[in-house]
Image (cartoon, rainbow, N blue to C red):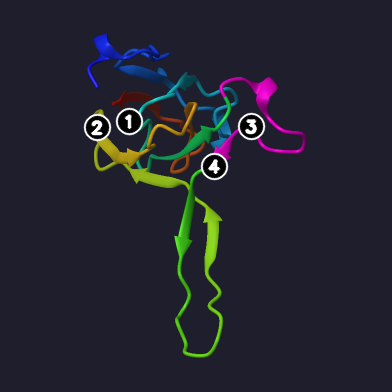
Amino acid sequence: MLPILDTHPRGYQNPVILRISAALPAAGAWDAAPIESFSSGARNLTLAFTYTRAAVGGAVDFQLEISLYAVAANVPTNASEWVTESLYASGAVVPGADTGSTIQREFTTYQATGAGAEDFGYGLLALQGTVERIRVRARESGSVANPGTLSIVAELV
């Protein structure tokens, strides 16, 4: 649908800044307060990263988090407001037996190849219009004593 014809305006405007270019937290800690954005109505998400290592061996971990709730007040009792991306591995199919599969929370690592700024994309991720908010947390995972610089930009369609 054309945005001009949409009866429910989006709560975001592309490009969406999810991390202003800045040094990652010290000692390999995750971002304490990642920037969140509305994503209601978006069917797909693409992330663009720019990482500059601060020392040889620099690497960055990132982790997409989604919220099914437009505001924290809508979160049911004892439910999580933010859900971490996951990785699924199906078990072996054996005739006559149930299959046990595995699911775990996931994060992704990018290892720098040189001293300059390096860019990379992640996605196209299907949101299918069901995710109300998104955020991406990050941490230095290579040279944790020398955190690199990272920016994250999203495109929602």
Q: Identify the main secondary structure in magenta.
A: loop
For the residues labelled 3 and 4, the Cα–Cα distance comes to: 10 Å
Q: Which residue is mark 3?
A: 81
Q: Which residue is mark 1?
A: 51
- What x and y, as percent, mark residue 57? 37, 44
Give SS at disc 4: strand
Q: Which residue is mark 2?
A: 119
Q: Is 75 colored magenta in this rendering? A: yes
For the residues labelled 1 and 2, the Cα–Cα distance comes to: 6 Å
For marks 4 and 2, the one nearer the N-term is 4
Q: Nearer the viewer, residue 16 or 60?
A: 16
Tell me the amino acid under the disc marked 2.
Asp
Does 121 appear above or below 9?
below
Tell me the amino acid under the disc marked 1.
Tyr
Circle number at residue 84: 4
Tell me the amino acid under the disc marked 3.
Glu
* Label pair 3/4, CB-CB below 8 angstroms: no
> Of circles 4 and 1, which is in front?
4
Q: Extreme right residue here?
A: 77
**Magenta residues, start to end:** 70-83
Does 3 appear above or below 84?
above
For the residues labelled 4 and 2, the Cα–Cα distance comes to: 23 Å
* Label pair 4/1, CB-CB below 8 angstroms: no
